[in-house]
Image: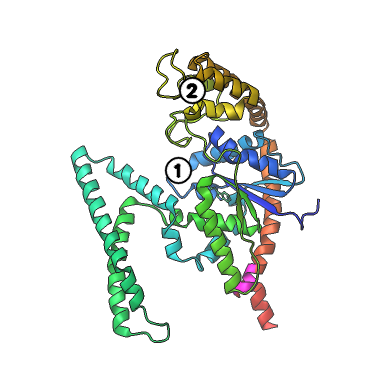
Amino acid sequence: MNEAKKARVFSGIQPSGDIHIGNYLGAIKKWVDLIEEHDSIFCIVDDHAITVEYEAKKLPERTFEAAAAVMACGLDPSSDNCTLFVQSHVSAHTELTWLFNTITPLGSLFRMTQFKEKSRNALAKILAKESGEARSTVLHELKNTGLQTAEAIEALRPRIEALVPEADEVDEGLLAALNDGLGSVMQGLQVGLGVSGASTGLFDYPVLQAADILLYRASLVPVGEDQEQHLELCREIAGRFNKKFKKRIFPLAQRVPGEAPRIMGLDGKQKMSKSLNNHIGVLDPPKLVEKKIMRAFTDPQRVRREDPGRPEVCNIHRLHRFFSSPAQADELDEGCRQAAIGCGDCKKILAGNVNAALGPIRERADYLKAHPGDVIDALDQGAARCRTLAAQTMDEVHEAMGIGSKALHRFCK
Ligand code: TRP
């Protein structure tokens, strides 16, 4: 195919083991569909995985399993258009991250909700070790001081903005006063984030993600809705780089939504996620899938078998829309409203259909686990191709930024 003309697709997935049907319907299935029409690169993002607590000894296994799982889901690296590799095997990802760091405002990173969430979770974990009483006092005070600080800064914003002088008439006294104010705010942040133990790597996570995408100048990124903010940052970095160094090196990448923007967990309350343990793994054995579905949450108002149900609020029904034929889903919808079918039977049918859909995936996964060399070969070839592509981009980036040996040699000629 004509590589130069087709938009390139890039996406990444964390090596967290256990890929679930939310990941599958939210992104992976879309990846697989896109391969036919596009040059597609997929990455197991181990450099991202190490930004939170993890066990180094277990990471290679997690990485292997993630690669085998996406291959089992239908991603075929032996096809011309499809490259699969492990992020840490191509060192340019971390190199480009550093260069992007120099043009990324701290403010843009502090806005990232995923960072805020993850550092809050880390803090909550630490506090969970305290006794109930001590914990609630700390939490209470933390919230109060946090809110007061945020309000105070917000109230000051227009006045600060009015004070900030034009760049060429800097008033030393004003600058010193602003510095003092900022100093206190930063100290507050430092204490808060310091206690949470969040790493610099976690803070920088979105910049690494931008480097992943832009290293290959990909313009299409199939990922879940929760990644939209990271993609906005990626566009911000691309735009700023192009403008600052007066060269259009990077495209503004767009998110490609998956089939299902948001698959709810079996608790019917939160998004499906491995950490909430409300998920169906694509490699769960059939019995486990059935057990999980039989226990899942349905329409809370349908208490007895004779009560008519409301499929529109039932998570099991939503899953039928993805795993059962439209005719069967319509029929179950009707049966549920008339109380002609009970939740137990409706769930059994779903479990059967989910297992039928996952069957071929499980089979391929079993095959790959028995033939690990196939996975390793694909990853090695993938990394080799990516290193070549990445080197071309890095050359242009170095040249634009005035760093690297080529620029120096040219200067000395
Ligand atoms: N942050 C993404 C996630 O958690 C994973 C990821 C890392 C990614 N780098 C990427 C996704 C580049 C798309 C493109 O799902």
Say which quarter of the image contains residue 94: bottom right
Q: Nearer the viewer, residue 189 or 392?
A: 189
Q: Are marks 1 and 2 in contact (CB under 8 Å)?
A: no
> Could you tell whether 131 is left or right of 168 in the image?
left
Q: In the rendered structure, find residue 54 and report the number of the disc placed on it.
A: 1
Q: Assign a secondary structure to mark 2.
A: helix
Within 10 Å of the Cα at label 2, are there few (<14), some (14-19), or many (20+) other Cα atoms?
some
Seen in the picture, residue 183 relative to 317 is either above or below; the reply is: below
- Pinpoint residue 326: horizontal percent, then vertical percent: 64, 26
- The residue drawn where x is 27% and y is 40% is 129
Q: Nearer the viewer, mark 1 or mark 2?
A: 2
Within 10 Å of the Cα at label 1, are there few (<14), some (14-19), or many (20+) other Cα atoms?
few
Asked if residue 287 shows in the view, the reply is: no
| Residue found at the very far front of the displayed protein | 338
Say which quarter of the image contains residue 24: top right
- Pinpoint residue 85: horizontal percent, then vertical percent: 64, 47
- Would residue 398 be counted in the magenta stretch? yes
> Could you tell whether 295 is left or right of 349 in the image?
left
Q: Is mark 2 within 8 Å of ligand 1?
A: no
The stretch in magenta equals 397-401
Asked if residue 342 shows in the view, the reply is: yes
